[in-house]
Image (cartoon, rainbow, N blue to C red):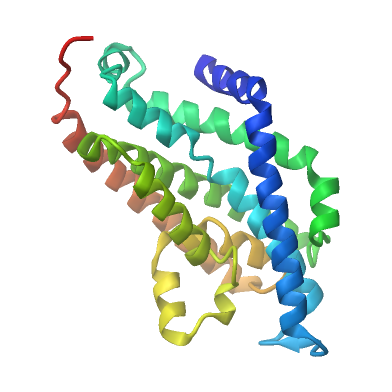
Amino acid sequence: MEIIRGRLRIAVTYRQNAAFLLAAVVMQIFILRVVWTSLYGETEVVNDVNLSSMLVYLTIANLQNWALQDPSVSSYIHSRVREGQVAFDLLRPAGFVPQMLAHLVGSSLAMVLFAVAALPVVALAGTLGPPVSAAAFATWLVSLLCAYLVALLLNLILGMVAFWTMEITGIGVLYYLVNQFFAGALVPLDFFPEGLGVLARLLPFQATTYTPVAIYVGRITGTDALLAIGVQVVWIAVLVLFARLLWRAAVRRVIVQGG
């Protein structure tokens, strides 16, 4: 809890940085709104998706993707490894992985607070709307929690790559580009070509963004929504197992000189 509170305080202290990052997301939402509105033109419905539903999807998807994908903790992990400070983390009673998860939780909580505060601006840049039904809203909340856990584990795994590479800036940029695309933040998975759509649904990124937002706007309903949440739960289990195996391999590589 102290780490979570500390990470929250850091985010609030350096709120100008979060504000600039949020401004970039708002600009992206606005650009996507203009582009998709132009693509639809006079057509009301494309692939069974009307324009208003598409704009709500894009707005929420990008805001949610931004709030759950804070890169600062991955950078923190790699700096601890590069500078040898990870030796002190390993000596602490809580354990390295729980500490990093606490950093991630605190950071994402701060991002969510910033996102909620920016909703009026986001509504002007994009399009916000209510869920299609009360049932969809309840299912979306469950799916959103699962999406958060998947995103949390992916960021933890990304940070642990530093034990092998010592530098993850380039990998991080590549990860966030791939994540945005395959998560469906730029183009919903319904619009992917058949082969690319199958690939996207086999990767964990869609579980962080597309699944909960598609439930919110009514693209996934009923039994399909429950199955989609089941896929998210499977990905949580797979990523937990992978993170445990990765950590066991990573800790064997720790050699601290000097400091």
Q: Quadrant of residue 118?
A: top right
Instruction: Identify the residue at image location x=40%, y=57%.
Output: 234
Question: Picture coordinates of residue 32 (x, y %)?
Answer: 69, 67
Q: State the image coordinates of residue 66 (x, y, percent, origin top left).
A: 60, 48
* Left or right placement of residue 3 versus residue 57 in this view: left
User: Is any part of residue 85 visible from this angle?
Assistant: yes
What is the quadrant of residue 254 in the picture? top left
Q: Nearer the viewer, residue 144 or 165?
A: 165
Q: Give above or below for 170 relative to 127.
A: above
Residue sitting nearer the eye, 1 or 51: 51
Q: Identify whether 68 is placed above or below 221.
A: above
Image quarter hosting the C terminus = top left
Residue drawn 72% across and 52% down?
26
- Left or right, residue 115 beside residue 211: right
Count the numbered circles shown.
0
Locate residue 233, reporting x and y percent.
46, 55
116 sits left or right of 140 in the view: right
Residue found at the far top of this picture = 259
Which residue is at a point 48% across and 26% down the rendered structure image? 102
Q: Is residue 230 visible?
A: no
